[in-house]
Image: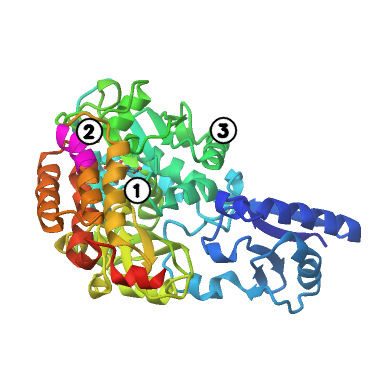
Amino acid sequence: MTMRVFIPRDAGAVAVGADEVALALEQAAAVRGMPLEIVRTGSRGLYWLEPMVEVVTSSGRIAFGPVSATDVPSVLEAMASEGPHALRLGAPGKIFWLRRQTRLTFARCGVVDPRSLGDYRIHGGYDGLERALSLGADAILADVTASGLRGRGGAGFPTGIKWKTVALAPADRKFIVCNADEGDSGTFADRMIMEGDPFVVIEGMTIAAIAVGATKGYIYIRSEYPHAVAAMKAAIAAAKRGGYLGARIGDSRHGFDLEVRVGAGAYVCGEETSLLESLEGRRGIVRAKPPLPAHKGLFGKPTVINNVLSFAAIPFILAGGAKAYADFGMGRSRGTMPIQLAGNVRYGGLFETAFGITLGELVDDIGGGTLTGRPIRAVQVGGPLGAYFPRALFDTPFDYEAFAARDGLIGHGGVVVFDDSVDMAKQARFAMEFCAIESCGKCTPCRIGSTRGVETLDKIIRGERVNDNTAVIEDLCNTMKFGSLCALGGFTPYPVMSALKHFREDFGPRPARLEAAE
Ligand SMILES: Cc1cc2nc3c(=O)[nH]c(=O)nc-3n(C[C@H](O)[C@H](O)[C@H](O)COP(=O)(O)O)c2cc1C
Ligand code: SF4
C-alpha cells in the first residue's frame, strides 16, 4: 500500500529544512522499494516543531517533529511499522497547542494540499460562495455585518459597514483589493494562510465582489513573500480552470477576475491609500482622506480594501452563518483572532482563538515563557506601532477596546516577547528610527518629528539632561499623535510612550540592571 506523507511547503518550514526532509524521505523510500506519496501542505503553525511531518496510519494522521534529514530513515521505519519514535507527536489535533485553539479561519491550513482545488472542495471549500450566490448581495452584507467581523489589518473597522459603503456607491466599475503587505514585526498569519489555504482568500474576495458589485480584484503581496506569491498565482489559475473565477462564477451571472501584484518593500505601502498609489504604478505615498477608498479608491473607483485575514474569515461566516462566528469573542470583538506568537518565546507560532484570552495566558501558558528561560519583561502587541506591555498589564484580554483602554492596540495580532535583558530606551529609539526610515514624507510631524525623536532619545541614552529631553520626547509624541496624516506617524508614540511610562528606569544613564547582566 502507498504510504501517504504530508510535509509543509510553508516558507517557515522550508527555512528549517522541510525541502531536505522531503527529498530524504523520497530517496529513503525508493531505496527500500516502498511506494510513497508526498503531499506538500501549509504549516499547522507550531513552528518549534517544524519540519513537522505527518503520515496517514490506521488510526488517522500521526505527526513527527521536528524532523531533520538525518532522522528520516528511522522516522520512515516508525511510520511504516506504526511503532514508537522519539519524535513521534501523535495525532496533530491532540497536541496541546492545537487542542487549545479554535480554528475557524485556519481550519484547513496544514491539512490540505494548497495547490488542489479538489482538496479544498472536499474540506468544505466554496460552501460559503455557494450560499452567497443563493442569498444575493443584500443578505451577504447583512450576514457579514451580523457576524461582527472587524478588519484584521490593524484598525479593526467593521467589515460589513465598509462593504455596504462600496455597495451603495454608484459607479461603472468597482474593485476588491486584498492587503497582503503584512509589514508588522512578528506577524506571519497572512503569509501562512496564503501559502497553506490560498483558495479561502480567493473565496472571501469573490464573495465580497458579489456583495458590492465588483468585477476585478488585486492581491497586493509584499515582495519578501515569494512562496505566497507562487501559491496565490497557482490557486488563481486553478480557480479559473475550475470556473470559480472568470466570466461566470459557479455558472452564475457574476463575473470576477483576480491578479497578484507584488510590492517593492515599503512598510507604508501597507497603509491602504499608499497601497492604492503603489498599485496604480506610483510611489507609495499616503493619500489624504476623505475621499475614502470605499468612495474613490483604485483608479478613482469605489474599492473594498481588506486584510488577508478579513477576507479569509468570510467563507466560514457565509457557510456556517453569522451567528456561528459571532458566538465567539467578547464585547465588540467578535469571532476569532489568528494570534502570532513571536520574538523570545518558547513556543512560537500561529494560535487562533476567540477574543478574550488574556495576554498573560498567551505568553505564559501558550507561549511557555521565553526561549532563553529568563523572565519576560515586556511584550509588544500590534507590530512596530504597538505598545510595550509590562507584566502588570498581562491581565488585559485580547479585545480591541480593552487594549485601547490601556493605550495599546491589537493591530494584526502580532505578539513579540522580550526577556529581562531588553533595554527599553533602545526599543523606544528603535520605534522612532523605524518611523524615520519608513515615513512616506508627506507630513511634517512624522517626517521631521521621527528624526528629531531619534536624536533626542540618543541624548537621553547618553545621559544628557535626561529630564528635559524626556519632556521634549513627550511633547514631540503628542505632536506626532495628533498632527500626523496616517497611523505611521500617529501611532509611533505608542511604543515610545509605553516604554517611557512602564520602564522609566531604562531611560537615562545605562541601567544598573543591564550593566550587571553584561
Ligand atoms: C503604516 C501602516 C501600515 C499598514 N500595514 C498594513 C498591512 O501590512 N496589512 C494590512 O492589512 N493593513 C495594514 N494597514 C492598515 C490598512 O491601512 C487598512 O486599514 C487595512 O488594509 C484595511 O483592511 P481591514 O479593514 O481588513 O483591516 C497599515 C496601516 C498603516 C497606517
Ligand atoms: S504620518 Fe508619516 S507615513 Fe503617514 S502620511 Fe505622514 S509622513 Fe507619510
Residue on which disc 3 sits: 237
Q: Is residue 406 magenta?
A: no
Percent of width and height locating residue 362? 37, 71
- Give, as a single range, the part of the protein colored magenta: 444-452
Q: Which mark is residue 310?
A: 1
Name which of mark 2 and mark 1 comes first in the sequence: 2
Residue in the image at 37% along x and 20% along y: 281
Label 3, label 2: how far apart the Cα atoms are: 28 Å
Q: Secondary structure at mark 1?
A: helix
Q: Amino acid at mark 1?
A: Ser
Q: Which mark is residue 41?
A: none
**Badge 1 density bin: few <14, some 14–19, many ≥20, Cα 10 Å:** many
Classify 314 as above or below 442. Answer: below
Name which of mark 1 and mark 3 comes first in the sequence: 3
Residue in the image at 34% along x and 34% along y: 269
In-image side of 499 versus 478 (left or right)? right
* Picture quarter with ligand 2: top left
